[in-house]
Amino acid sequence: PRPIVVAPPDRPGRPVYTSPWVRPVPPANWRPVYRKPLLARFLGLTFGVSINSALNQLWNSNYVVDGYGSDEVYLRNVNEMGYYWDDVTLFFVNGGMVRSEFYDSTSYYNLSRYNNVYRTLCNKYGNPVSRSGQTVSWFGYNGDYITLQYVGMNTSS
């Protein structure tokens, strides 16, 4: 049996979490255009998968699992949407995966990745339903959503 918790190692560039997560909600008058999930699968996982199943699938698919807790899994150097992401965190609530966050750490202000991922998502899902500064969201018909955000964050370096 594996340990219950394996803390990820300290390293420069890892995001520092400072505020609680709030699930975005679509505008009151918004209605879905089509009846299918925005993301049925990513990283070989589906939403709702248990943390143990997710860990097994990630290891079997050769992802770098940097650590995990009772409610999160930390990955490094993940290839998704045509980019390598320095850090990915998968979050689990009540036994199932509910969200993920992908990070790219740079020491300078650089919107090129944000702009390219934005264009890719617009080509796939149309224009975002909501926008606030450099945060945009697309919503699916069954409560699913994708939020893309560019934020300067403090890191340990």
Image (spheres, rainbow, N blue to C red):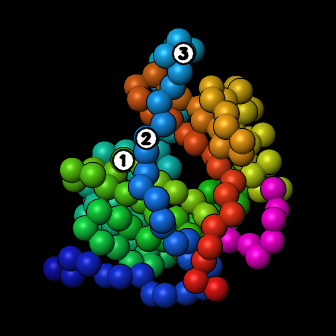
Give the labeled residue for mark 3.
Answer: 30
For numbered disc 2, what is the local secondary structure? loop
Q: Residue at x 49, y 16 (%)?
A: 28
| Contact between labelled residues 1 and 3, with CB atoms less than 8 Å apart | no
The circle drawn on residue 98 is: 1
Magenta residue span: 105-111
For numbered disc 3, what is the local secondary structure? loop
Amino acid type at mark 3: Trp
Residue 15 place in picture, x, y as percent: 55, 71
**Of marks 1 and 2, the one in the foreground:** 2
Q: Residue at x 21, y 81 (%)?
A: 3
| Sooner in the amino-acid sequence: mark 2 or mark 3 | 2
Crowding around mark 3 (Cα neighbors within 10 Å: few <14, some 14 to 19, many 20+) is: few
Determine whether 117 is above or below 34 in the image.
Answer: below
Residue 141 as seen in the image, left or right of residue 115: left
The image quarter in which residue 121 lies: top right
The circle drawn on residue 23 is: 2
